[in-house]
Image (cartoon, coloured by chain):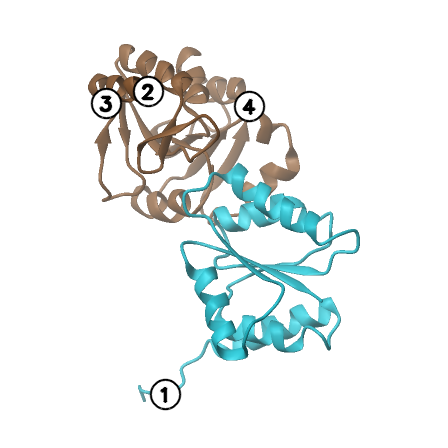
Chain colours: A cyan, B brown
Amino acid sequence: MIQALVLTHGAIGAELVRVVELILGPTEGLRAETNQGRSAREMTEIVSAWVSELGPDPHGVVFIDDYGGSCANAARLGGTEAANIPVVSGINLTMLLAMVTWRDELEPAELVQRVVDQGRKAVTVVGGAR
Amino acid sequence: MNLVLARIDDRFIHGQVTVGWGQRLRPDLILLANDEIAGDPWQARIYASTVPPDVSVQVLSLQEAAATVLDPASDFAHHERVFLLTGSPSDMHALVAMGVPLERINVGGMHFDSGKQEMLPSVYVDRDDLVVFRTLLRRGVRLAAQAVPGGRETLLDDGLLAAMEARL
């Protein structure tokens, strides 16, 4: 199963994972981590440890909340390139729901593309103002 | 070359630097002085990639950074708004010891690490850090902890350092 590490500022990641489980029920393979109170080195070590836990043929994706910053730096420095694990920025609820929904049916590259496409579609004006 | 801020931050180039201080101070060059990152082009590229396109970035060793700041004929001498960044007090002190004239240092982020204790929110220190801070104070440098513009500023003065020493 493709695992996800949701590495974000503050409690964003933990709340996203919590809400996904409110909607879909208890869900394996989702891990939330925060940058709060952590140095770059500690964050990078958290990513490295998570990558190692995936084993020799890692199937995973790291989601971060913003394109640049401490989460992005740690996600990229923590061994994701060597393990061929995509790092995807801009995580939102739609993306995480899509990830869990499709992860047993799609290959990792297709899954990431689907998640990104769904996430982009979700960022839109749905009504209210004319 | 004119410095707009000298900051100690163990996350190096990240949101508080590029967005928080960056939007307020409008630096035209972020100069990251760090021996490890300067010696690893891959790491340097990752840190440099998070900076807005209108801001230049240079990742240099401590020695190169000091030489660059002090050389009026350096390739970067024309920069008028330079944001100088190190990952630790000892690295910032090394720049001062090499002659970089700093009147004030922003203590941005020194996060928890083994052997360190909280002095202020986001400022964890050990005895070595306190020795470096004292050395900088004796040189007449103003040390102030402030994470982001408009945030609470706390002076790191002799009293605060002494109180912390007593706790370590």
Identify the residue position indicated by label 3 in the image.
B160
Q: Earlier in the sequence, mark 2 or mark 4?
A: 4
Which three-letter amino acid code belongs to the residue tagged 3? Leu
In the figure, B132 relative to A122: above or below? above
Same chain assignment for discs 4 and 1: no
Q: Residue at x 54, y 32 (%)?
A: B59
| Residue A62 place in picture, x, y as percent | 60, 58
Please state which of residues A113 and B96 is positioned toward the viewer in this rendering.
A113
Dot 4: within a 10 Å radius of its alpha carbon, few (fewer than 14), some, or many (20 or more) residues?
A: some
- Indicate which disc residue B61 carries: 4
Q: CA distance from mark 3 to mark 1?
A: 54 Å
- Asked whether the residues under marks 2 and 4 belong to the same chain, the reply is yes
Res. A26 image quadrant: bottom right
Same subunit, labels 2 and 1: the answer reads: no
The residue beneath circle 2 is: B102
Q: What amino acid type is highlighted by mark number 1?
A: Gly
Q: Residues within 10 Å of mark 1 (few under 14, many from 20)?
A: few
Q: Is residue A3 left or right of residue B127?
A: right
Q: How many marks?
A: 4
Precedes in sequence: disc 4 or disc 3? 4
Q: Are marks 2 and 1 in contact (CB under 8 Å)?
A: no
The residue beneath circle 1 is A127
Q: Nearer the viewer, residue A105 or B59?
A: A105
When asked about the image quadrant of residue B116, the answer is: top left
Left or right position of A57 against B166 = right
Residue at left offset 68%, top offset 60%: A60
Q: Position of residue A111 (x, y in %)?
A: 68, 71
Answer whether residue B48 is visible to the viewer in this image.
no
Q: Could you tell me which chain the residue with mark 2 belongs to? A: B
